[in-house]
Amino acid sequence: MSKIPVGVLGATGMVGQQYIALLNNHPWFEVHYAAASPRSAGKKYSDAVAGRWVATGGELPAGAADLVVGDANDVSRTLVAAKRGDCAFVFSALDMGKEEIQSLEEAYAAAGIPVISNASANRWKPDIPMLIAEVNPDHADIIPAQRKNRGWDKGFIAVKPNCSIQSYTTPVYALIRAGYEVKRLIVSTMQAVSGASYPGVSSLDMIDNIIPYIGGEEEKSELEPLKILGSIEGGSFRNAEYPKLSAHCNRVPVVDGHTACVSLEFGEKKPSLEEIKRVWTEFKALPQRESFPMAPAEPIIYREENDRPQPRKDRNSGKAMAVTLGRLRPCNVFDIRFVGLSHNTVRGAAGGGILNAELLRYKGYIG
Amino acid sequence: MSKIPVGVLGATGMVGQQYIALLNNHPWFEVHYAAASPRSAGKKYSDAVAGRWVATGGELPAGAADLVVGDANDVSRTLVAAKRGDCAFVFSALDMGKEEIQSLEEAYAAAGIPVISNASANRWKPDIPMLIAEVNPDHADIIPAQRKNRGWDKGFIAVKPNCSIQSYTTPVYALIRAGYEVKRLIVSTMQAVSGASYPGVSSLDMIDNIIPYIGGEEEKSELEPLKILGSIEGGSFRNAEYPKLSAHCNRVPVVDGHTACVSLEFGEKKPSLEEIKRVWTEFKALPQRESFPMAPAEPIIYREENDRPQPRKDRNSGKAMAVTLGRLRPCNVFDIRFVGLSHNTVRGAAGGGILNAELLRYKGYIG
Amino acid sequence: MSKIPVGVLGATGMVGQQYIALLNNHPWFEVHYAAASPRSAGKKYSDAVAGRWVATGGELPAGAADLVVGDANDVSRTLVAAKRGDCAFVFSALDMGKEEIQSLEEAYAAAGIPVISNASANRWKPDIPMLIAEVNPDHADIIPAQRKNRGWDKGFIAVKPNCSIQSYTTPVYALIRAGYEVKRLIVSTMQAVSGASYPGVSSLDMIDNIIPYIGGEEEKSELEPLKILGSIEGGSFRNAEYPKLSAHCNRVPVVDGHTACVSLEFGEKKPSLEEIKRVWTEFKALPQRESFPMAPAEPIIYREENDRPQPRKDRNSGKAMAVTLGRLRPCNVFDIRFVGLSHNTVRGAAGGGILNAELLRYKGYIG
Amino acid sequence: MSKIPVGVLGATGMVGQQYIALLNNHPWFEVHYAAASPRSAGKKYSDAVAGRWVATGGELPAGAADLVVGDANDVSRTLVAAKRGDCAFVFSALDMGKEEIQSLEEAYAAAGIPVISNASANRWKPDIPMLIAEVNPDHADIIPAQRKNRGWDKGFIAVKPNCSIQSYTTPVYALIRAGYEVKRLIVSTMQAVSGASYPGVSSLDMIDNIIPYIGGEEEKSELEPLKILGSIEGGSFRNAEYPKLSAHCNRVPVVDGHTACVSLEFGEKKPSLEEIKRVWTEFKALPQRESFPMAPAEPIIYREENDRPQPRKDRNSGKAMAVTLGRLRPCNVFDIRFVGLSHNTVRGAAGGGILNAELLRYKGYIG
């Protein structure tokens, strides 16, 4: 099988670099095209990222090094370049104003190039799916309606949610799928600095310190799970009513890996702690059943040690695509408490985007 | 006025050092006596702490340097030494087994030497007060009953609570005092490594990492506020019924300062955010009214910036004795959310102990 | 005595804030005037630094909070404002292009307002003194020649050296003054992130990492001591020939405090280790003899512990104005080795600038 | 080819764990035997390291998990166990007193089991080779003389040097091999906390701090290269006379990776900077020519960026077995300066030990 040629928009930023790194030797996809800001446009990719290659896991892949970077702001020319690269779809890791991202992503989709996006700009459009491949793969099936709404032929936009919600949304979904209503959830996150991109957070704020605030993050952490757990009704998404969610989001001196302390209230049916662990450790979904290349064998790993998960020790579990849980125990106020952890720039960004692309190819929307 | 001579048990440990540092030039108290483990016994205090003086705020005070350290395990001889030092009472920062601490603190009290303790060993005795001077100063008045129960003449034991609860207990009490019932509270803490003493937490666990577990800490964080907010009935303490409390306790790479993310549910009467801020910023109690030397002028400081409190920037507010709050906002699940911060080795340990001693002197129980 | 009114240029930056903080309650000087970038101009100082007040040692002083910030780029209007503030001299902590700083500092001096600068822009002018008050106070006496060269009446420019050299230049000078030639010196520094200002170094580069490079820092570290140890000949400075100096400069995850590992070769006369310690611990200079307000009682502190100096424990010694030394030992290659430490934003920046102003007032050049 | 069965002494410590991790799926060797302290003896290996598995690179290998740990202190019984495990040789990562390690390693060798050791205890025996496989592979050929001296038949002891010297010894050797005498070298290291084992350095000493001292480290850093660069004369080692070496060793808040700032003086023949880079980048030795499994393809990597090498970004280069260099530049005092970095628990510990074993098998001394 020959590989599907893909592009990366915002290819020189932190998430863009992570896409380039993770797509190296991918069995289905191959990067033929990269676009970034005007500052990088026209340079060789290796020159454009020289001195600021920050992707986890080593060196810049040889294949990507020689790509000539396009100007992501110049839609018409990048479209030509994308088509010349025979670009079947693009990953969007654009880092610009919200309206600009919306316009640019729409322009690609309108031109027949599907967009699989990390950006938050299009997450709340009622006909755009926000996908976690293990949780709501069927939300991809809004794509025909989306195309129809917008008069697009082959193109579409699909997005992934914010990195902060990955540490608790899949385990909550696993419990719901097993038949246990989840009514209320209070979460306090401790988020890695890579989530703020590079240079991001000043070292003066992260030595002997934490910052109990991340702009816009609590709103995303509270709302996005409701779209993901929601349903398609009449060609648009309807949010789930539950769980009611409240989030405290904190920045801590950790390179990669977002940790979440979760307190959770069930509906009337309340599983035992042992039942919950069983649900989590046995949880598999479409990506596992179909062995998608980027899918972790176990999407949820439960650790019995009393002091896990920890970001440095657990973030790379399951190719950095698993959610690691621990400390499941009763709660004086709600029903249970636990701690969740996931890798924010792999599962929470580029890795999650690639898994979504695999899902969309499996479903026949790309490729 | 001549100063009251005092002793410090466990004087060479981290909290003991903090007592020595904070009592330097105290207007009421003067350290005449220090006891520690057999390893340090017989040494000059300056030699016993050489190379491991870790107290905040600089050098070993000259006055303490020449004290000869007693053996805290040898009760009879340390009692003789304590009396020779004309020791009116002792601060206990003992770091040994729970039963040993109980025995030793009781032996001092039985010998007529009041014990003002940081240790958790005696916190749950029904006739021993657990004091935050701004919250429950009247709990000191169980001392006559305690003396009677135990056949003690001048001695008694009073304790302070765990460092983790300081960041939320005073603000919660301020709201209760202002007439607002607090029904439920979920808190997630991010605690400094100095709370684990020295050497405490390995650097291998605190570089690019957090640990979502501190042994015994969640239980203390949930229960101790209930005794403090409780009442004396018939010569023993009765816990408050509310708030129901649930705690997640995390260790983070911060030197000093415990941060708490709090979600809180009121009873039927629900104050506005403005009213809550008014209650907090106007809060004063006995230590402020009587200008105790260790009391902060403002026990609760509210900061309006959206990213405060932060440990490195706010822990030293109010001589490191104030609680700094911020980020008061509505909660989707309960009524309000906020972030609190206090200095764990000053307000949460030695400073809180000294303020308790000031309270007990004011009330005539020592001096 | 009424205080001398002073101004601060670049008042909202990290070093400017440190000036504002350290000049609070200064017995000789009082801030009447502050200028910064156009972005801050016209704002109240407290508003201009809101949310980014980073100076060591607590809160924004009340006196400075209400100053209206001038536009440092608009020379004529700031000069009017400076004069209206009855500004006897200014501290320059300007953070802009080298030529702009030169022009602006010269404009102030030409207008009769002496400039005491932290900036590197004017350090290598042959008629501008680069002062460490304990080392080369007599270099101030080039000021009459400087005024004459430039046709200035009351104004002049005096600068302080880079923060990186403070940890070794004074101890080296003390040995030279005691009669021991210092021929060669190899130094490797580990420098705090506050030296890069705010936001400065990304947290992604300072968690689990060090950076073995600081732009321009090695050149400054090697050359500046030679001007300071040099002499005035015919109205301009002549560099010292020795010591030959080579520097490695590294950035490490420390908030404040630059550490230097020094290997040093003497000339023919080689002091014993005991003699060296004696020279250092007995070293006093003009600022100590005349008790300048900002001068540390002991400019050089030697610690005997084998693992000191350490930045967090020693940077605040002597009001953060002392150099702390330790680990003096023989060297297999040169004669001796030692470790030095000084506080980079106090001694190495604003504190050093204020001490220079005290020296210049003592010598009658300002006030 | 069936794999050679090997044992690991001190298997539960940090270096021992690293051996277990790196030997997983090794093409030549397979762990059949593990010994540790009496506390771990009799336990399954997975239980003995439960909660303190710290090796880089993920989970405990399944093959090792079920090994029953022997008591390393009980020589006779562990020898029986070792032989039962059909143990062809052992890796020693023992962490006990120097004399105990010497006795134990000698007992194994005397019993016919070669010992490839990380411990410093036997490094200075005149008939024991201290090997860096790329630098002095011929030093292995002292083994026949060692066996004869000690009356040993099949057994012998070979050691590896300290982790701190790996960042500069191979590049210095490469220059010497290319015909350039290296006369003098001053090095200042910034060493990772994993070098102090677990729990090792307290987090209170590594947040916002560095420690300019590591016990015994400077002596090792100065002396060990001289044995490695020395020669065998009459059945014992004779140290090289040059380079004269002086080391400052510092502990910094980095998990893995020792960085060295090196200043170096050549003899009369002085290569250009370009020639030096050529020598380094073209350097290959026996392990590369023979493609030993643990050997990096390029033992020395030179990076042209001005701010490299950095520990977090470069420590894993060449399977964490390469030395990464950068910042080659002239020196005002000596001839050149550069920065070197190597992974202290892989190249500097278990990986280096395994590469030595591969060398010794290649030379026919084991297997």
Image (tube, coloured by chain):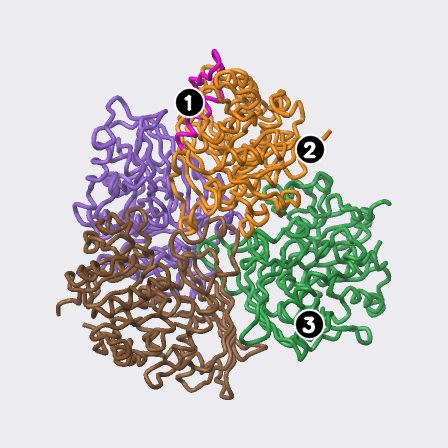
Chain colours: A purple, B orange, C green, D brown
Residue C57: image location, x then y, percent: 64, 44
Residue C321: image location, x then y, percent: 68, 54
The chain that hosts pointer 2 is: B
The image quarter containing residue B174 is: top right
Q: Nearer the viewer, residue B166 or D200?
A: D200
Q: Nearer the viewer, residue A9 or B313?
A: B313
Q: Nearer the viewer, residue D174 or D50?
A: D50
Q: Amino acid at mark 3?
A: Leu
**Residue interval drawn in magenta:** B218-242
Q: Which residue is mark 2?
A: B27
Decide: is A224 above or below C13.
Answer: above
Q: Are marks 1 and 3 on the same chain?
A: no
Bin the neighbour count of mark 1 within 10 Å (Cα to Cα): few under 14, some 14-19, many 20 and up.
Answer: many
Q: Examine the structure image and report whether residue B124 is included in the region drawn in magenta.
A: no
- Distance in Å between CA atoms under marks 2 and 3: 50 Å
Query: Does residue D73 appear left or right of residue B82 in this picture?
Result: left
Query: Does residue C3 appear left or right of residue C172 in this picture?
Result: right
Q: Which residue is mark 1?
A: B184
Q: Residue furthest top?
A: B234
- Distance in Å between CA atoms under marks 1 and 2: 41 Å
Secondary element type, mark 1: strand
